[in-house]
Image (tube, rainbow, N blue to C red):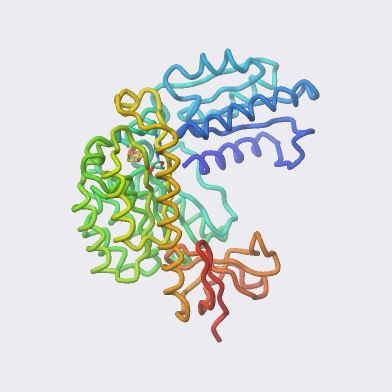
Amino acid sequence: MSERDAETLTQITRQEGYTSSDDLLNADLVIINTCCVRESAENKILGKIGELKKLKEKNPNLKIAISGCMVQQPGALERLQKRAPHIDIWAGTHNLHDFSALLHQAEQGGKVAEVWQEPKMPLESTPQAEKGKLQANVNIMYGCNNFCSYCIVPHVRGRERSRKPEEIIQEITDLVSSGCREVTLLGQNVNSYGKEFSPVYDFADLLHDVDQIPNLLRIRFITSHPKDLSDKLIETVAGGNKLCEHFHLPIQSGSNFILERMNRKYTREYYLSRVNKIHEILPKASLTTDIIVGFPGESEIDFEQTLEIMNMIHYSHAFTFMYSKRSGTLAAEMEDQISLDVKKRRLQRLMSVQNVKSLAWREQMIGNTYEILVEGPSRTNPERLVGRTRGNELVVFNGPSELIGSLLNIRITEAGTWTLVGDIED
Ligand code: 5AD
Ligand code: SF4
């Protein structure tokens, strides 16, 4: 979501005549689009803000903007402004569309800060994804109503708002005309898309309609909240042509006690029943997840239950995090916070379990053939090409650059924890 916002900021600044540069020392404008989901992200940003002060001393014409979630947190702006008076523009998550106006004021030599507490702009005026790229992220909704007790997102992104299907379909059709072949539909909880619509039109309906867009090759979506993952959605993915059989289904914890304290509104049994349903309808679907260790009150037994579930479910990848206290959330007020040492130890154990599982998942792919969308040269080995399976697994292979943007069949020959190696099938 933040990546998509950063793209919007890039587009706005381009329209204002700026071009991208790798030369930080001579830049006229630096924007840091921030995240605040965990303290580690915030600390990195604070470090960067400090470094930029030195840059501004060398280049007094430099304008610096800090935008996004970190700025949007209740009470954060005043604190940040005091700490970093050298910043020219502060813009909250609800103010990105108006960035050019803020930029004009800063160019005149002023310091500006705009952080609306609520989104005031109509959804129709939200900037569209950048054209001309093979892959695009498309916002289908904004905000979140779930208030998981650890999470700052609902506090900085506001309540759920769904874009109209016609607008989403038009945006994707335009993207496809400009060369896009894969879209990822974005929402904090895509499964509650369209809840406010009458007549009824839900996320499965949207997927079905996006699947009809000609010349689009693939459709992905993130993130699915397990509590709202309907049979209709799984069946729609199964019945689609371009709908990729991959579900990012964050479990967060394998303990019912912790899930309840997290306010996730499902039990491990319910989660497992959803996974079983996916496998029943789509036996080859890939699953990925997010897990937090060291949530307040998590005992060794609770943690063991998370490990147990990781061993039961064949995730192709898991994003694992240590719980990070976010002020303003319910969990930050809970008494039984877990020490950093314990959190680190649990994270290590979890990661070593998942690494074995990820490798096993990829090893069972060896010898089989998968459809790959060729993305471009491999970052680690630019002589080779890289692409993804429908399940979102990364595959490296030899081939000419003319293949970029096309679908190919690749037979997997080698597997690692994170990537696969394969050969083009004749
Ligand atoms: N601490 C640790 N991880 C968190 N996440 C969200 N909030 C926190 C927090 N306070 C994780 C969740 C979510 C992912 C995007 O980030 O696992 O799914
Ligand atoms: Fe945060 Fe929960 Fe909303 Fe995801 S569903 S953004 S974890 S509050």
Q: Nearer the viewer, residue 264 or 154?
A: 264
Q: Nearer the viewer, residue 115 or 58?
A: 58
Residue 174 visible in the picture = yes
Q: Is residue 205 left or right of residue 125?
A: left
User: Which residue is farthest bottom?
Assistant: 426
Residue 93 position (above or below residue 346): above
x then y, percent, for residue 371: 47, 74
Residue 138 position (above or below residue 231): above
Residue 262 position (above or below residue 349): above
Q: Is residue 425 left or right of residue 229?
A: right
Residue 416 position (above or below residue 293): below
Q: Where the C terminus falls, by quadrant? A: bottom right
Q: Nearer the viewer, residue 124 or 85?
A: 85
Q: Quarter of the picture for ligand 2?
A: top left
x then y, percent, for residue 111: 63, 16
Name which residue lies at 39% across and 33% down: 153
Count of numbered circles on the image:
0
Q: Nearer the viewer, residue 321 or 126?
A: 321
